[in-house]
């Protein structure tokens, strides 16, 4: 795996052929630790045992009382109180180098690493930790634990590979969306390819709809959620909800509309221009509705004020 930057730990890792961790029953903590290190240094071997050999000079984790062991009295905790385990201690030094973005490394720590660290330190249930634990040989099996550890590490590496791939692709997508944002008008963002747009677009207050090619053919139009309220800024008209094909075209007056979701956050059309038109019609209806209810509230306040005066 190519890194975005190097540091003391990555350089040390490049210079070693083998790492060391505890033997016996393994857990998600030591398995993911090894999987991460092996992704950075493919072909990296692991030795497991109850004591670290005195002549061992490589990286040691989850045993031995060193920088990547969390079993001593000097327990390290994050600001939110979640204690570090070996995987978290390694990620603390390697995360930004792996993802190339400090904020994304922190998010991955919060969403993925911390639950595993918490599980290892406190026994708090975690589904991924449970899956890794199931790779341990059952009590009456004639099976080598070290071989089982390597199978678990292969599985963990696949998980990390997919996680990192998606995170990096989203970072690229945020950059790719920017030119489209610069060209957006009337609160409608139109893209000529699908991109993961939600993170970048939901921060833009002026964007209410996104139009992009559908992987099923035609075009998809989606209403953008408010980043704070988590509600759609401007849903499609209620009378369109759940309608499709001829019925939807007749109700909307837009010929190539094919489907509107039953909750009104998304619709599809054969033609890009019709998908854009549907967004414009929806914005106009929303504005009129907002103005109407503002007038109703204003009239109500006036009426109430007159009663209070009497």
Image (spheres, rainbow, N blue to C red):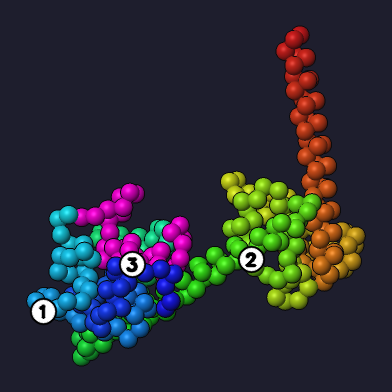
Label 1 and label 2: CA atoms lie apart by: 51 Å
Q: Residue 144 appears in which quarter of the rendering?
A: bottom left
47 horizontally vs 276: left or right: left
- The residue beneath circle 3 is 7
**Residue 73, how many percent across, how many down?**
14, 55
- Pick the front one: 27 or 86: 86
Label 3 and label 1: CA atoms lie apart by: 24 Å
Q: Quadrant of the C terminus?
A: top right
Dot 3: few (<14), some (14–19), or many (≥20) neighbours within 10 Å?
Answer: few
**Residue 124, how many percent across, how many down?**
30, 60
Q: Secondary structure at mark 1?
A: loop
Number of numbered discs overlaid on the protein picture: 3
- Pick the front one: 289 or 11: 11
The stretch drawn in magenta includes residue 198: no
- The residue beneath circle 1 is 55
Q: Residue 178 appears in which quarter of the rendering?
A: bottom right
- The residue beneath circle 2 is 176
166 horizontally vs 217: left or right: left
Which residue appears at 42% of the width and 73% of the height? 3
Q: Secondary structure at mark 2?
A: helix
- Asked whether residue 6 appears in the rendered view, the answer is yes
The stretch drawn in magenta includes residue 89: yes
Which residue appears at 65% of the width and 50% of the height? 204
* Mark toward the start of the polypeptide (1 vs 2): 1
* Stretch of the chain drawn in magenta: 75-104
């Amino acid at each position: 795996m190519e890194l975005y930057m190097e540091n003391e730990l990555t350089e040390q890792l490049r210079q070693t052929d083998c790492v060391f961790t505890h033997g016996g029953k393994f857990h998600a903590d030591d398995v993911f630790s090894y999987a991460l290190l092996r992704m950075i240094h493919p072909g990296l071997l692991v030795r497991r045992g109850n004591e670290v050999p005195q002549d061992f000079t490589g990286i040691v984790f989850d045993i031995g009382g060193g920088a990547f062991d969390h079993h001593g009295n000097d327990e390290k905790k994050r600001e939110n109180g979640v204690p570090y385990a070996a995987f978290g201690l390694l990620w603390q030094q390697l995360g930004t180098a792996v993802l190339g973005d400090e904020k994304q490394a922190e998010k991955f720590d919060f969403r993925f690493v911390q639950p595993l660290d918490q599980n290892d330190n406190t026994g708090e249930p975690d589904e991924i930790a449970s899956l890794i634990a199931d790779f341990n040989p059952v009590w009456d099996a004639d099976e080598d634990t070290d071989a089982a550890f390597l199978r678990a590490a292969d599985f963990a590496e696949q998980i990390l590979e997919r996680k990192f791939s998606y995170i990096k692709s989203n970072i690229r997508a945020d950059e790719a969306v920017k030119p489209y944002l610069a060209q957006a008008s009337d609160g409608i963002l139109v893209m000529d390819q699908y991109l993961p747009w939600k993170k970048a677009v939901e921060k833009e207050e002026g964007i209410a709809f996104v139009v992009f090619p559908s992987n099923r053919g035609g075009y998809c139009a989606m209403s953008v959620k408010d980043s704070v309220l988590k509600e759609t800024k401007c849903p499609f008209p209620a009378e369109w909800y759940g309608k499709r094909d001829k019925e939807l075209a007749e109700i909307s007056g837009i010929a190539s509309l094919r489907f509107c979701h039953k909750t009104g956050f998304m619709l599809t059309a054969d033609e890009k221009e019709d998908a854009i038109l549907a967004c414009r019609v929806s914005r106009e209806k929303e504005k009129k509705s907002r103005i109407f209810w503002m007038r109703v509230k204003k009239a109500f306040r006036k009426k109430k004020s007159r009663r209070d005066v009497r």
